[in-house]
Image: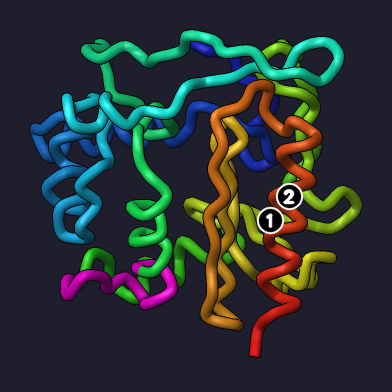
Amino acid sequence: MTPLLFDPGDRWQYSTAIDWAGLIVEKISGQSLGTYMHQHIFMPLGMTDTGFKISDAMRSRKATMHRRIEGGKLETTQMETPQNPPAEMGGGRLYSTTGDYLNFIRMILNNGAGNGNQILKPETVQAMSRNQMGDCRVCKLPTTNPTVSLDAEFFPGMPKTWGLTFMINSEQAPTGRSANSLSWAGLANSYYWIDPAKGIGGVFMTQILPFVDQRALALYLDFETAVYENLP
């Protein structure tokens, strides 16, 4: 059992909650989480390079993981999630590509529809996209292992809430991202955002540790800023 850090509803904490949601999906569906997502999300959206397990075709194109070391240089490092874990976690460990994840972002922007299929009901997307934690706010995440992640906070000083799935910035971001846009990130400095107000989204992927590597994060924010500066 994982001990509670505080009573539910008192504050926000990045946690294993989505992993537990994945286990609930497995229990209700009678399928592994990967099988369920493959049938109901990935294949309908045309996300042919996404899954918990690496196919032979995926492995031949798998990017090499790197780690930032002293002096700012990068060194290669071996990192691969277990291919036959006891449980497939709802909160991470998927392999994917930029193109596949853009298909997912388009589906959210299109009220749950993508690739000619209705994946989610529009009201489900709306619930995913609005504040679901009342007066609590997303806060800074202090690191417990600087080799894996540095202290993490997006847009420090800006109030941020959380929907059923995404972080939500309550104000317009310095990059130009609209208020009430959606975003989050992956451990190896992979970032995305979804801006329903302007009808755009973006994906920025690297394979660099630790999380919130300052060079990678700065490049991502420059990329997002450039997108907004060049909107018609």
Question: Which residues, given as a range, are shown in magenta?
Answer: 107-117
Q: Position of residue 204 (x, y in %)?
A: 57, 50
**Residue at x 42% of width, y 50% of height:** 98
Q: Secondary structure at mark 2?
A: loop
- Marks 1 and 2 in Cβ contact (< 8 Å): yes
Does 178 appear above or below 43?
below
Please state which amino acid type lies under the numbered disc 1.
Answer: Thr
Relative to 198, is 230 on the left or the right? right
Q: Position of residue 100 (x, y in %)?
A: 33, 52
Nearer to us in this view, 149 or 223? 223
Q: Position of residue 42 (x, y in %)?
A: 22, 50
Does 63 appear above or below 104?
above
Q: Quadrant of residue 85?
A: top left
**Residue at x 65% of width, y 17% of height:** 67
Q: Which mark is residue 161?
A: 1
Q: Residues within 10 Å of mark 2 (few under 14, many from 20)?
A: some
Report if residue 64 lies within the magenta region.
no
**Residue at x 18% of width, y 31% of height:** 57
Does 221 appear above or below 141?
below
Q: Quadrant of residue 34?
A: top left
Q: How many labels sit on residues?
A: 2
Q: Nearer the viewer, mark 1 or mark 2?
A: 1
Relative to 204, is 143 on the left or the right? right
Q: Residues within 10 Å of mark 1 (few under 14, many from 20)?
A: many
Q: Which residue is mark 2?
A: 136
Q: Secondary structure at mark 1?
A: strand
